Image (cartoon, rainbow, N blue to C red):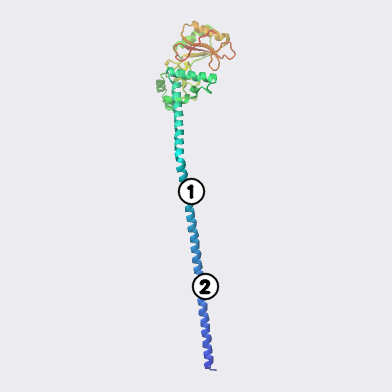
Amino acid sequence: MAIDTRDELEERAAEERLQQEELEKQKQQERQRRRQQVAQIARQQVKQAGKQAAKKAAQKAVVQGVRSAATAVIAAIAPYVVPVLLAILGVALVIFVIIVVLAYLCTSDTWTGTAARSASKVGAFLGILDTDYCKYLEPVSGALTGATTQLCEQNPTELARQYNTPVNPRTEDPQLQDLIRFIEGEVGPMVTHTYDETYPLCNTTRGIPICEPACSHATSSCHYGGSTGSTGALAVDFVGVGSQGAAVLQAARDSGIALKRATCENSSGTAVPCTEVGATHVHISLGSCDRDSGPINTQ
């Protein structure tokens, strides 16, 4: 077995030291590389956090800017918007009051109500008004009366009491029945219409369509007893024109019963000669009706 010499031992020791140094150097390099990686990751995280913070700050700034701009705009236009809104509300209130007042006038039993209804009807007929506003405002007038759907459907007695009309909506004034009997005795049996047959409850509410979708005659028509009658229908329409219509009118005069209106009419309720092509019926109302006005014709 060979024995290493001193030189060989020293050489081997030197090599081991070099290897040890090289290994230590590699370890240091590895530690340095890891520290650099950690530092790089930290820098990236800091950079990312900075970007997010900057983004949030920018968003916050934008929101604050929008809020500030909106506040400035509102503050700038507020002095103008508020008066405009108040003016619009004021105009709406005035229109509402006008509608309510007109609706009240159109159903009033005083001379002002009669004047309002007459002016509305004449104005519409002459083309001064685009429509008969009293007729147009009948639903509003109905609402003002205070009658309810419950009264219409469940308590017709109370409804009749409110309007001072007969509980039975299909009621004719006794004097009107006498007039019809006399005329038919002179002229012969005829088709007649007194109360509203299509919309019966309109007879109770005097032509105000609060219990029915519509009414066949104008509000407070003599067919509904006028505005104050309490005995039922005060008018009759005879389905007859021409010579027959003239005979009906003559018989009405001969009856001795006081009349308010007796004339042939067209479909619009306008007085026309019985021989006119547009004549559709004879309308006769009793003198006790407070709504109709002449003429009292004989042809």
Element at label 1: helix
State which tag comes first along the sequence, 1 or 2.
2
Above or below, 101 against 250 in this view is below
Residue drawn at x 44%, y 27% is 97
Q: Nearer the viewer, mark 1 or mark 2?
A: 1
Q: Nearer the viewer, residue 48 or 69?
A: 69
Q: Nearer the viewer, residue 256 or 49?
A: 49
Amino acid type for the residue under numbered disc 2 = Arg
The answer to whether any part of residue 168 appears in the image is: no
Residue 33 image label: 2
Q: CA distance from mark 1 to mark 2?
A: 49 Å
Q: Position of residue 91 (x, y in %)?
A: 46, 31
Residue 66 image label: 1
Q: Position of residue 294 (x, y in %)?
A: 49, 11
Above or below, 239 against 31 in this view is above
The answer to whether any part of residue 122 appears in the image is: yes
Residue drawn at x 51%, y 70% is 36
Q: Position of residue 21 (x, y in %)?
A: 51, 82
Query: For the view shown, which residue lies furthest in the right direction?
Result: 277
Element at label 2: helix
Quadrant where the image shows the N terminus: bottom right
